[in-house]
Image (cartoon, coloured by chain):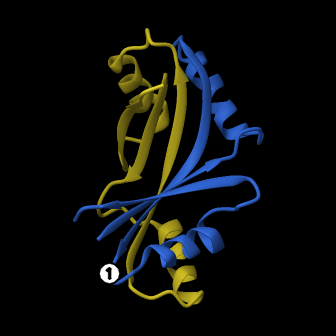
Chain colours: A yellow, B blue
Amino acid sequence: MKVRVYVSLKNGVLDPQGRAIHHAIEGLGFSGVQDVRAGRLIELDVDDTVTDEALDAMAKQLLANMVIENYRIERVAA
Amino acid sequence: MKVRVYVSLKNGVLDPQGRAIHHAIEGLGFSGVQDVRAGRLIELDVDDTVTDEALDAMAKQLLANMVIENYRIERVAA
């Protein structure tokens, strides 16, 4: 079973990577982009026996830095 | 309007970051994880006037490296 974990910076946390992307988008001549935030996407291939609690623990302990980041877990039908 | 761009490595492309995460997950004692792939998530805040074509061009020119990466664009209702 596929699981996707989306990790994004909390509101209010400075995002230099997102700002650099925003700057580059404007440099390429695109208009209408108000803000850019950069995050991570981690795709896991797990056995069906892996519980939501285990996925939650992985995200908290390893995948996201809970001080500055939020995460969202999504199970994808195989 | 919020737009999310998901960038992930194409199949067959070596993913050392994903492998390191996989190794760390096992090191923490979690079992049942078969594979891990690492990607990026870019959240854009755009005007409603920005077309799908413009978003596609941004992804192709800047956000994803088309040689080794795929991207997926998702518009999120505001």
Tell me the residue at 43%/8% (across/down).
Answer: A49
Look at the picture and state if A74 lies above or below A29.
Answer: above
Q: Position of residue B28 (x, y in %)?
A: 53, 17
Instruction: Judge left or right: residue A7 versus residue A42.
Output: left
Tell me the residue at 50%/45% (across/down).
Answer: A41
Q: Position of residue A74 (x, y in %)?
A: 37, 34
What is the chain letter for disc 1? B
Toward which corner of the image does residue A65 lie, by quadrant? top left
Element type where label 1 sits in the image: loop
Tell me the crowding category of disc 1: few under 14, some 14 to 19, or many 20 or more residues within 10 angstroms, Cα based: few
Look at the picture and state if B31 lies above or below A3.
Answer: above
Q: Position of residue B47 (x, y in %)?
A: 32, 81
Judge by depth and name the residue closer to the eye, B73 or A73: B73
Look at the picture and state if A47 lies above or below B66.
Answer: above
Look at the picture and state if B33 lies above or below B65.
Answer: above
Instruction: Judge left or right: residue B76 versus residue B12.
Output: left
Toward which corner of the image does residue B3 lie, by quadrant? bottom left
Judge by depth and name the residue closer to the eye, B44 or A53: B44
Tell me the residue at 59%/87% (across/down).
Answer: A28
Q: Position of residue B67 (x, y in %)?
A: 76, 58
Name the residue beneath numbered marker 1.
Answer: B47
Tell which residue pokes out farthest to the left in this image.
B78
Please name the amino acid that badge 1 sits on. Asp
